[in-house]
Amino acid sequence: MSSGLKWKLIAGFLLVFIAGGAAGVFVTVTMGHQFMFGPHQHGFVAQTMKNRLRWQLKLTDEQMTKISPIVEKTAAQLEEIRGDTGHRVRDVIVESHREIAQYLTPDQQQRLKQMEERRRQWMQHRGMRRRNGPSSASPSETQDSD
């Protein structure tokens, strides 16, 4: 095998490896973000857990019937934790923006408000708005009222 062909093969394999890694990162980030911040799909977690347990443990129908209530309870608890985590993340971001706003110029504060509005619209579009009303006021709005 010639030296030139050898380097072309190495470069080709390296390129395929890098492309695969990039695709993996993209899928992981997309799916992770969807899982953490995506719209709530009641029952999805439980069904996924049941499917995985059935397949990996080769469970019988009788076993599935017996463990289903346990899986349902676990999934409900996990979905509650997921929702709480999403709210906590939002609250931390709102507080950080509130603290940051005091060091910004008026133009930068306006841009921060625009960023917050885009995020709010995106979350509203995704169905992530709090069920008990609109999300809390932006930090810059709160600061303006002080």
Image (cartoon, helix red, strand yellow):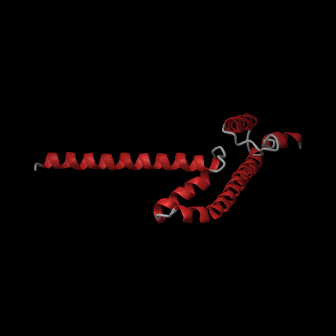
Quick one: 32 or 62, which is closer to the camera?
A: 62
Q: Left or right: 33 with respect to 101?
A: left
Q: Nearer the viewer, residue 102 or 88?
A: 88
Residue plotted at (73% across, 51% down)? 87
Residue 142 locus on image (x, y percent): 84, 43
Residue at the extreme front: 62
Instruction: Indicate the quadrant where residue 124 lies.
Output: top right
Q: Position of residue 13 (x, y in %)?
A: 27, 49
Q: Residue at x 52, y 56 (%)?
A: 51
In the rendered structure, the answer to whether residue 83 lies left or right of residue 47 reads right
Residue 30 pos. (x, y %): 53, 45
Residue 140 falls in which quadrant of the image?
top right
Where, by quadrant of the figure, is residue 62 drawn? bottom right
Q: Hey, which residue is sitting farthest left in the picture?
A: 1
The spot of residue 49 in percent (x, y) is 56, 58
Instruction: State whether residue 41 is above or below residue 72.
Output: above
Which one is in front, 21 or 139?
21
Q: Residue at x 77, y 44 (%)?
A: 130
